[in-house]
Image (spheres, grey):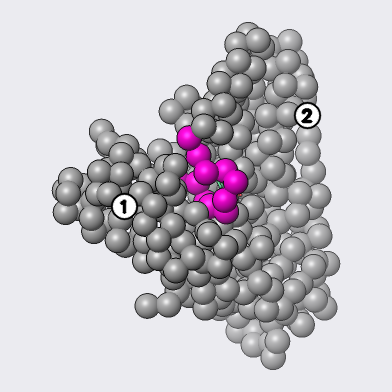
Amino acid sequence: MAVIRPSSFAEWLERVAPAEVKRNEPLAPWCSVRAGGPADVLFRPKTPDSLVTALAMAKDSGTPVSILGLGANTLVGDLGVRGLTLKLPNSTFQEEIALDPAGGTFVLSAGASIARLVTLMKQHQLVGAEFLAGVPGTIGGAVTMNAGTKNGECMSRVVAIEVATADGLGWIPPPTFRYRHTDVPAGAVITRAKFRLPTGDVAASQAAMDADLGYRKRTQPLSQPNFGSVFTNPPGHAAGALIEKTGLKGHTIGGAQISTLHANWIVNLGDAKAHDVTSLMALAQTRVRETSGVELTPEVKRIGEFLP
Ligand SMILES: Cc1cc2nc3c(=O)[nH]c(=O)nc-3n(C[C@H](O)[C@H](O)[C@H](O)COP(=O)(O)OP(=O)(O)OC[C@H]3O[C@@H](n4cnc5c(N)ncnc54)[C@H](O)[C@@H]3O)c2cc1C
């Protein structure tokens, strides 16, 4: 296959693929922690074919590809993201709803919000996705991260995923998954996910969501920009308790702070750089290693180039 070397990858994409293409687009507004640099090229496909075309062009030209959902679990480097950053509009992929006496099957676009699944569950008097109420993000992000709480995880409700690669688009069985991780095939972009929800006790379902949302309001710094839990919980430990034990709660570097409300959350006080956030993360890891002998693993995903 001939290697394609466009003088400007963005210009080239604009010509061949129906899409919104933005150059040097700041990504901080697209991420919940509101920090980080720009994307060289932000690409929002308007049709499934234009996504496949872009992936093929990226592959042929050796252009790196990053994917952003709602950016609720992503930290973008201050030096920005080289190559192509994909952000899928909800409307590019079609939603499908099929109901039967035992429950419902919902095909949701990867760019749709997680809240859409919870809304459909409630609307059709179904149960089983309560643990996703209050989790910000897209369907693509929820599947990739296997988002959830101690009460359940996203992939337990997924029966198939549709993925795009440079070779085309197709449905595959649910990949294997574990705590906050799904084995999405390398290089694949999730375009849709099919969920199965059963009938059940709707009142109990609503009560569980109310309790969960109340708990979030009491314990999480939801009024400040953040990306949720910074570290996964190590087996047998709570990351927040381990960090709190080091005395770092409230510790600030630049514009970033280890939340005074929950030690496993970092908040942006207004002008945080990604470097402030990574410095706090490194400090928390060092202190927890020293005080508890436990290695903290970041839950947040990084894209782009970071200051050393
Ligand atoms: C206030 C708050 C509360 C939170 N509470 C929880 C919680 O209770 N439980 C929990 O699990 N998480 C929680 N999170 C984290 C976050 O909501 C989840 O991880 C969510 O699934 C992220 O979705 P997203 O679309 O924002 O993903 P992003 O952050 O945009 O992306 C996350 C990862 O998924 C990849 N990705 C995104 N879309 C696609 C796609 N279409 N194809 C392939 N890869 C893709 C990205 O490349 C990245 O690696 C919380 C975050 C916040 C800000």
Secondary structure, magenta segment, majority class: loop
The location of residue 276, given as percent across then percent down, is 43, 67
User: What residue is drawn where x is 63% and y is 73%?
Assistant: 39
On whether residue 227 falls in the magenta region, the answer is yes
Q: Is residue 257 left or right of residue 138?
A: left
Camera-nearest residue between 136 and 123: 136
Residue 179, numbered label? none
10 Å crowding of disc 1: few (<14), some (14-19), many (20+): many
How dense is the environment of label 2, judged by Cα within 10 Å: few (below 14), some, or many (20 and up)? few
Q: Which residue is mark 2?
A: 97
Dividing the picture into quadrants, the one containing residue 114 is top right
Count the marks: 2
Q: Mark 2 or mark 1, which has the lower sequence index? A: 2
Farthest bottom residue in view: 7
What residue appears at the point 32 percent right and 62 percent down from the top-left corner?
A: 282
- Viewer can see residue 302: no
Real-space CA distance between mark 2 and mark 1, rounded to the nearest whole angstrom: 47 Å
Q: Which residue is mark 1?
A: 248
Indicate yes or no whether the magenta region holds residue 225: yes
Q: Quadrant of residue 285?
A: bottom left
x and y percent of residue 200 in the render?
63, 10
Q: Position of residue 81 (x, y in %)?
A: 56, 74
> What is the span of residues highlighted in magenta in the rendered image?
219-231
Pick the front one: 71 or 41 = 71
Does 258 appear above or below 244? below
Residue, x 52% and y 78% (percent of image)? Answer: 79
Q: Is residue 167 left or right of residue 277?
A: right
Element on which disc 2 rests: strand
The response on whether ligand 1 sits within 8 Å of label 1 is no
